[in-house]
Amino acid sequence: MLLRTCLFLITIVCACPGAVLAQESEMERQTRQMERRMVNEQADFQLYLQMMKVNNYLYQYCLWNHRWPEPIDQENQVINQLSELIPNNPYKPDQLQESAGESTDPDYRYVNQPLNEDYSGRAASGFSRQSSYVPDNSYEAYGSKKIKLKFNPSLTIQEAEEWQSDPPDDWQESPGTITGISNGMNLVVVWGAGADSRPIRVPGGGKVRLFITNILMDAEGYGNN
């Protein structure tokens, strides 16, 4: 009986080599999908940890300054420091991995008038007053940065909580981008873009991973300086 079964299976394999190849190909495809899923989930978790650092920084900034950073100089300074605090993109593991606080990003250039005479073409360090700030100069991020700050005066806690289940359709950024949003009064929301450019979610397709922080700010002071 066993011999007959083995001969039957051998006959099927010999008669249908295409089916066997197709099955092997399907198994390889499923294996690659599983590997990509595991890599993306690991990157999502690393991005989540970076979002936590961004949220903590923005909370401390608003706590001490009683305001959301204003364009241009304040916003660029915060973006610069946050980019140095979390310099690496979890979705680009092949890139040079930098240490926090020592950014090598060449896209940060001193701009405005007059240009800094000591500018050497290197990125300014947001943690060093001497190199990150020069009187009569400001710096600005050229190109696409992984940190974005947005001001939304109509933002409410109810809307932010709804985003956990149904994020806006226009929330699409390059993978690894972290966006901070505030109404400038009492609310800060932080979200991060995953491999599909959409907000990362709790593993298994759950709610969107957001940091929602309540903090009292001086709303009347925003935009008046």
Image (spheres, grey):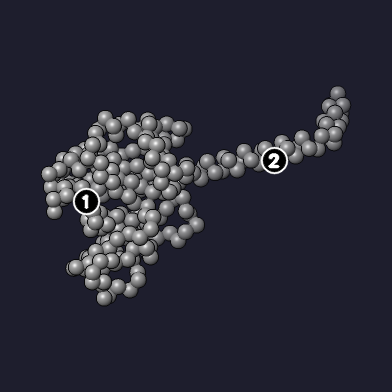
| Quadrant into which the N terminus falls | top right
**Pointer 2 residue:** 25
Q: Position of residue 38 (x, y in %)?
A: 52, 42
Residue 69 tag number: 1
The amino acid beneath tag 1 is Pro
Q: In the displayed orientation, state which residue is furthest to the bottom.
A: 117
Find the distance from the CA under tag 2 to the CA under tag 1: 53 Å
Can you see residue 73? yes
Residue at disc 1, secondary structure: loop
Q: Earlier in the sequence, mark 2 or mark 1?
A: 2
Residue 6: tell me if it is visible.
Answer: no
Tell me if label 2 and label 1 are in contact, CB under 8 Å.
no
Residue count near mark 1 (Cα–Cα under 10 Å), binned few <14, some 14–19, many ≥20: many
For residue 141, side relative to residue 213 (left or right)? right
- Residue 195 or residue 222, whichever sits in front: 222
Judge whether 141 appears above or below 40 on screen: below
Which one is in front, 60 or 218? 218
The image quarter in which residue 184 lies: top left
Viewer-side residue, 82 vs 151: 151
